[in-house]
Image (cartoon, coloured by chain):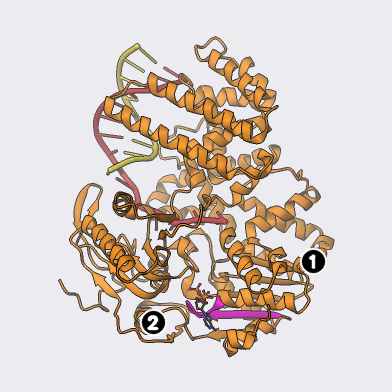
Chain colours: A orange, B red, C yellow
DNA sequence: TAGGCCGTCATTTTT
DNA sequence: TGACGGCCTA
C-alpha cells in the first residue's frame, strides 16, 4: 500500500519521520502524535529499503512494542513486523543469550522476578542468623532499594533514605554493613546459580559491551536505526546502553514528554531527555504543539493546571483541533460507593444512549484497589472490562507456585522453587522448607528423600512429590500442565481440610481455591503453542500480562501508569482528592513526590478525547475510618466547586 | 518448629 | 481493610 506521508503527518512530524540519519529528538506534549511518528518512521525506513533486521524499536512495555509493529505492518506490509521491537529488558535478555559467555555467564541463565529476589535474600538472611532481628528492613524493601540504587547510580544508603524517609532510615542505619554483606552474598548466589534479575539484564549487557568492543561494533552495524518511545522514563543504565550502541553510528530517534515522566520512583530520569541534545551533538530537535487527541476544553484544563502547578520542565501549550462545548466535569459524590454507582450509570448512559463502544471508555485510578467497588458493580451488571495495572496474573501466589512445579522439573536444583513448593505441605514451615530446599539445591530430586527430617510425618508427601516430578519428565508439555493442575488442586483441597478454622473462613478459602483452578486453566491456555516449559517461562518473566481473549467489546479500568500512550473517548479519573490522587497533600507541594503526582495527573486527563469526569468523593474511607475528601490541590483552584 | 490467634501498623505506581 | 510480626501451645 502507498503511504502519503505528507498527508498523514503535519510538517514537523514529517520532518521527524524523514530525518533518518543522525540523532533526532521529538519533545512534545500529550496527544501530539509522537507515537504516530515512530510508527510512520518504521514504515518509512522499510519503504526506503532498510532491512527490518537493521531496525531496533525500544518501548516501555512489550505490549506497546507489538502494537506499534502491528500498526506499521497494517499500513505498509509484513516486513514491518520483522523489526526488533521490545523493552530494554527483553532486548538485553536476547543479547545476553548470545553473548553472556563473554563475561563468564552461561547463556542458559534464568531470569528471576523481584519475588524470587526477595526469597533469595530471606534465605541468605537466615544463613546469617539475622532473619528475625527487630527493625531489620524487609527483604522486598532491600530488593527495591538495591534496584533503585543501581538504576539511578546512587549509593545504597541514598536509595534507602529516599525510600524510607529520614525517620525510618535512622532506625535502620546501624544495619547498613549487614545489608551490604547480604547484598554481596545475593550477587554471588545469583552468579553461582546462573540467575539474573531484571537489573542484571541491563548491567551484564553493559559489561558485555564494555569488555568487547567488537561486539559493540557489530551490534551498532546490525541495529543501524534505533528508535525509542517514552524516553522521558528511561534511566541511567538504559541511557548508558543506548549511548554505547551509538558511538559508531548515530542514527537514533528518541521521543518523549518531560511532563509525562512518572516512573521517577523507580529511577527514571527526565534529565535524559532534557539533556539529550547536549549529549548528542548535531541533534535535530522537533517540537510538536498541535494536539490531535482531545477537544479544546480538555486541553484548556491541562494547560492551566500545568501552567499553575508545574515547577519544572518547560511549559508546552497545546492546541486542540476542535471545540466541543462540553466542559470536563468535577463530580462530588457523597462517598466512594456513590462514586462507583455514578460511574456505572454514566457508563451505561454513554454506551446505551450515545452509542459509545465500551472499549472507548476508561476508568483511571492512582492505585489499583481504588476500583474494587466499581468492579463489583460492573460484575453485577455484567459489563465486561479489562483491568490493567496492579497485581499481575503471574504475581498471584497460586500461579507462582504452579510455575514452581515446572521450575523444579526443569532444574531440580532450583532452591527457590523448592522453597516455595515445600511450604505448601502440611507440617512444613519456613525452617523445614529452607533446609530441605538447601538439600535439594545440591542433591536435586534426591534431596527430597535425603534431608535431615525424614522421620517427620510429612515424609510420605515428599516421596509422593518426588515421584510426581519424576513422572513429569516423560510428559508432553500440555499433559504436564494438566498433571500439575490436578496434583496442586488436590494439595489445596487437602490443606483446606486439615485447617482448623471457622466455617466462614473455610468457605472463603474454598472459593479462592476454585478461582485458582480457573486461573490454572487460563494459564494452560496461555501455554498453548509453546512446546517446552523453558521458552514459556522465559517469555512470561518479561511480559507478565494476562492473555487477551476474543474480540469482545470491553471497557478498561487501568492504573494511570499502565495507561501510558492510550486514549479513550470518555475517561473517568477516580478519587481526585488529596492523599488518594494525588497520594500527596498540600503540605508536600514542591517535593519530588508531589511533582510526580502532578505529572501523573497530566497523563490521566490527557488520555481523554472527548469526555472527562474527575471524581472527588466528599468522604473517603481510610483504614476503616471515614475522612473528609479534600479536592486535589491541583484542581481546587481551577474548578468552580458546586456542592 | 508449625501454625493459630491477636494486636499493630501502614498504604502507590512496575520492567 | 489487610498484611505481617510476635506470642503461645501442641
Ligand atoms: N498528523 C495527524 N493527523 C491526524 N491525526 C493525528 C496526527 N498526529 C497524531 N494524530 C492522532 O492523534 C492521537 C494521538 O497520537 P499519539 O498517540 O501518537 O500521540 P502521543 O504524542 O504519542 O501521545 P502521548 O504522549 O499521550 O502518548 C492519535 O489518535 C493519532 O492517530
**Is residue A642 among what the camera can see?**
yes
Q: Are there few (<14), some (14-19), or many (20+) residues within 10 Å of tag 2?
A: many
Of callouts 2 and 1, the N-terminal one:
1
Quadrant in the picture for the C terminus of chain A: bottom left
Residue reaching furthest to the top: A455
Q: How far across and how far down the image is residue A398, in percent? A: 48, 36
Determine whether, in the image, residue A82 is placed left or right of residue A232: right
Total marks in image: 2
Residue A222's label in the rendered image is 1
Return the chain for callout 1.
A
Identify whether A514 is placed above or below A61. Answer: above
Ligand 1 contact, mark 1 (Cβ < 8 Å): no
Give the labeled residue for mark 2.
A295
Residue reaching furthest to the bottom: A11
Q: How far across and how far down the image is residue A609, in percent? A: 41, 75
- Distance from Cα at disc 2 to Cα at disc 1: 43 Å
* Boundaries of the magenta span: A21-34
Identify whether A386 is placed above or below A453. Answer: below
Q: How far across and how far down the image is residue A178, in percent? A: 54, 40
Residue reaching furthest to the left: A643
**Along the viewing direction, whichever of A402 and A631 lies nearer the viewer:** A402
Is A22 contained in the magenta span?
yes
Return the chain for callout 2.
A
Identify whether A535 is placed above or below A429. Answer: below
Quadrant in the picture for the N terminus of chain A: bottom right
Q: Secondary structure at mark 2?
A: loop
Determine whether, in the image, residue A240 is placed left or right of residue A391: right
Amino acid at each position: 500500500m502507498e503511504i502519503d506521508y505528507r498527508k498523514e503527518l503535519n510538517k514537523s512530524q514529517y520532518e521527524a519521520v524523514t530525518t533518518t540519519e543522525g540523532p533526532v529528538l521529538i519533545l512534545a506534549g500529550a496527544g501530539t502524535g509522537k507515537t504516530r511518528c515512530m510508527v510512520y518512521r518504521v514504515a518509512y525506513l522499510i519503504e526506503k529499503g532498510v532491512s527490518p533486521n537493521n531496525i531496533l524499536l525500544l518501548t516501555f512495555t512489550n505490549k506497546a512494542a507489538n502494537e506499534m509493529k502491528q500498526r506499521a505492518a497494517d499500513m505498509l506490509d509484513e516486513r514491518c513486523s520483522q523489526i526488533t521491537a521490545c523493552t530494554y529488558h527483553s532486548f538485553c535478555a536476547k543479547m545476553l543469550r548470545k553473548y553472556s559467555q563473554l563475561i563468564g555467564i552461561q547463556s542458559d541463565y534464568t531470569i528471576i522476578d523481584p519475588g524470587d529476589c526477595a526469597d533469595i535474600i530471606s534465605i541468605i538472611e537466615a544463613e546469617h542468623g539475622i532473619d528475625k532481628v527487630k527493625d531489620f528492613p524487609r527483604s522486598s524493601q532491600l530488593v527495591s532499594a538495591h534496584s533503585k540504587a543501581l538504576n539511578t547510580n546512587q549509593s545504597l544508603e541514598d536509595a534507602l533514605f529516599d525510600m524510607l524517609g529520614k525517620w525510618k532510615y535512622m532506625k535502620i542505619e546501624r544495619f547498613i554493613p549487614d545489608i551490604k554483606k547480604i547484598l554481596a552474598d545475593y550477587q554471588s548466589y545469583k552468579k553461582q546459580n546462573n540467575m539474573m534479575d531484571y537489573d542484571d539484564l541491563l548491567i551484564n549487557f553493559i559489561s558485555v559491551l564494555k569488555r568487547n568492543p567488537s561486539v559493540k561494533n557489530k551490534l551498532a552495524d546490525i541495529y543501524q536505526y534505533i528508535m525509542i518511545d517514552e524516553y522521558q522514563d528511561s534511566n541511567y543504565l538504559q541511557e548508558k546502553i543506548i549511548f554505547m550502541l551509538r558511538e559508531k553510528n548515530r542514527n537514533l530517534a528518541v521521543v518523549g514528554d518531560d511532563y509525562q515522566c512518572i516512573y521517577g520512583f523507580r529511577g527514571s530520569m527526565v534529565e535524559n531527555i532534557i539533556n539529550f541534545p547536549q549529549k548528542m551533538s548535531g541533534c535535530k530537535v522537533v517540537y510538536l504543539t498541535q494536539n490531535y487527541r482531545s477537544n479544546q476544553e480538555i486541553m484548556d484544563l491541562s494547560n492551566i493546571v500545568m501552567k499553575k502547578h508545574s515547577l519544572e520542565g518547560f511549559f508546552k501549550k497545546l492546541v486542540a483541533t476542535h471545540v466541543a462545548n462540553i466542559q470536563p466535569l468535577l463530580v462530588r459524590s457523597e462517598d466512594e460507593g456513590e462514586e462507583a454507582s455514578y460511574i456505572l450509570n454514566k457508563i451505561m448512559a454513554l454506551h446505551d444512549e450515545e452509542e459509545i463502544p465500551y472499549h472507548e471508555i476508561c476508568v483511571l485510578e492512582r492505585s489499583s484497589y481504588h476500583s474494587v467497588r466499581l468492579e463489583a458493580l460492573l460484575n453485577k451488571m455484567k459489563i465486561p472490562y479489562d483491568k490493567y495495572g496492579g497485581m499481575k496474573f503471574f504475581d498471584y501466589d497460586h500461579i507462582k507456585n504452579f510455575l514452581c512445579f515446572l521450575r523444579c522439573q526443569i532444574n531440580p536444583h532450583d532452591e527457590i522453587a523448592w522453597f516455595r513448593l515445600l511450604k505448601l505441605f502440611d507440617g512444613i514451615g519456613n525452617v523445614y522448607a529452607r533446609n530441605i530446599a538447601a538439600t535439594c539445591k545440591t542433591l536435586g530430586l534426591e534431596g527430597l528423600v535425603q534431608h535431615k527430617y525424614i522421620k517427620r510425618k510429612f515424609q510420605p508427601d515428599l516421596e509422593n512429590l518426588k515421584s510426581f516430578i519424576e513422572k513429569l519428565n516423560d510428559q508432553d508439555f500440555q499433559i504436564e500442565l494438566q498433571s500439575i493442575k490436578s496434583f496442586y488442586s488436590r494439595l489445596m483441597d487437602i490443606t483446606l481440610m486439615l485447617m482448623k478454622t471457622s466455617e466462614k473462613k473455610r468457605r472463603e478459602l474454598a472459593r479462592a481455591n476454585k478461582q485458582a483452578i480457573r486461573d490454572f486453566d487460563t494459564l494452560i491456555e496461555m501455554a498453548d503453542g509453546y512446546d517446552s516449559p523453558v521458552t514459556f517461562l522465559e517469555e512470561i518473566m518479561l511480559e507478565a500480562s494476562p492473555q487477551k481473549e476474543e474480540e469482545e467489546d470491553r471497557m478498561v479500568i487501568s492504573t494511570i501508569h499502565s495507561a501510558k500512550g492510550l486514549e479513550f473517548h470518555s475517561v473517568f479519573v477516580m478519587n481526585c482528592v488529596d492523599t488518594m490522587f494525588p497520594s500527596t497533600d498540600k503540605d508536600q507541594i514542591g517535593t519530588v513526590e508531589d511533582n510526580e503526582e502532578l505529572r501523573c495527573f497530566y497523563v490521566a486527563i490527557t488520555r481523554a478525547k472527548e469526555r472527562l469526569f474527575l471524581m472527588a468523593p466528599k468522604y473517603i474511607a481510610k483504614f476503616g475510618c471515614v475522612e473528609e475528601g479534600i479536592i486535589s490541590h491541583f484542581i481546587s483552584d481551577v474548578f468552580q466547586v458546586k456542592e
